[in-house]
Amino acid sequence: MAAGLLALTAEALSQAAELAEALGVRGPSRASAAASADRSIARVLLAEAGLPTPQGTRVESHQDAAAAALWTGYPVVLRPLANLGYYGAIRADKAEDLHTAWTFAHTAALAAETAPGAVLLEQAPDGDRVTLQTVTSESRTGVVAAVRTTFTNYPLFQPSSHLVTAEDMDPDLAQLAARAIQALGVQHGVGHVHTVMTVLGPVITDVAAHLQGDGVPELVRLATGVDLLLAAIQTATGQNPALIPTRAASAAVALIRARSTGTVTGQGFDRKYLDGPWLARLAWEAPLGTPVEVFPASVLARCVVTGSDPDACLANLAQARQAVRVTIQPDHP
């Protein structure tokens, strides 16, 4: 008999919850899995807990979106109602932008298993994006790291980089994230809470009871020594997770994206940086011969770097970006 079940991805969360219940073993609950997959469920639970989220509503058509945007006021963000991370998210600054934004978000939502075609329209909060990495054991939630994300390809929300640094956590922000995870009914496991740091305080834009993607767990391990994957296994099997930091550094990932549509025909990396102690990993995401797009922009490569502090880490990240060379043969009509 299995000691417990866990889901490493959002796509596997509901199946893991169903299987854990059927087998009678530890695993994600059906309620937390449903709330992680459906933003409308999460919004209700967060509101009931008195936690701040952007004003918004579910929309089923462009006409619904236009009416909702008049209610919330511009700018707005449209995203699939299904929690697909940043995929399918787009900003509309004025009414003239809404048709393109609706079409983009709706098209992304059609491929979702949860609420296919449905879109969430919300006010667009301005501020830095910070995602809190959480670990819950026996219904007690702690925050082990904060991830700062930058974006590219405006008005889309496509991550350009993620940065993790060993730092003292703001206790109020940590408490906010813990309350959000607890609002979903999570009793054990790893999760993450997306926030926007507005001038009026943090606003929660997403919460999910699974590991964050884009290699974020690796960044947390490199910067703090805390292994989120190990913590997920430990909590799933009833063990106490190892959450004491053993490092004090910074780590970041650059997501190199396509700047044109076509086919990848060449790849290279400046050799003088290959042996740099700060280059932790270089991964080609689009092999030679792969067709790539510019809207949304395909990921061509990922560079993971480290540094003694955030400034040193970001300087190394800039060097890694400059060192990557990708040739794209344009498509011919």
Image (cartoon, rainbow, N blue to C red):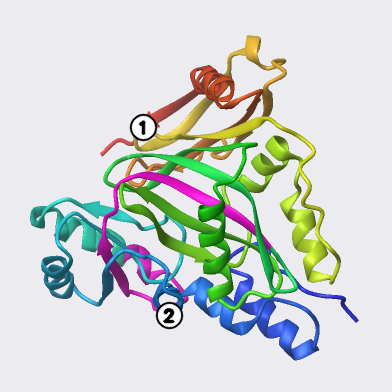
Give the magenta-colored segment's residue range: 107-135
Q: Is residue 60 left or right of residue 252?
A: left
Q: Residue at x 51, y 53 (%)?
A: 173
Judging depth in this view, the residue of 32 and 295 nearest the camera is: 32
Q: Is residue 172 visible?
A: yes
Q: In this view, does 315 lie above or below 119?
A: above
Q: Where is residue 51 in the image (x, y as percent from the top left)?
A: 42, 68
Which disc is residue 259 wearing?
A: 1
- Picture coordinates of residue 205, whole percent (x, y): 40, 60
Res 280 → quadrant: top right
Quadrant of the image occupied by residue 65: bottom left
Q: Give the residue at x 72% y 87%.
A: 21
Q: Quadrant where the C terminus lies?
A: top left
Which secondary structure lies at badge 1? loop
Q: Can residue 282 be seen in this view?
A: no
Q: Is 300 rendered above or below residue 195?
A: above
Left/right placement of residue 246 relative to residue 307 reads right
Q: Between disc 2 and disc 1, whose residue precedes? A: 2
Say what amino acid the circle numbered 2 marks. Answer: Glu
Q: Which residue is drawn at 77% across and 58% down?
A: 231
> What residue is pinned by disc 2?
48
What is the crowding at mark 2: few (fewer than 14 residues within 10 Å), some, or many (at least 20)?
A: few
Q: Where is residue 62 in the image (x, y as percent from the top left)?
A: 16, 70
User: Is residue 23 toward the left or the right of residue 302 in the image?
Assistant: right
Q: SS at mark 2? A: helix
What is the x, y in percent for residue 144? 66, 50
Give the farthest residue toward the front: 171
Q: Is residue 80 magenta?
A: no
Q: Which residue is drawn at 84% across and 70% down?
A: 237
Badge number at residue 6: none
Amino acid under label 1? Arg
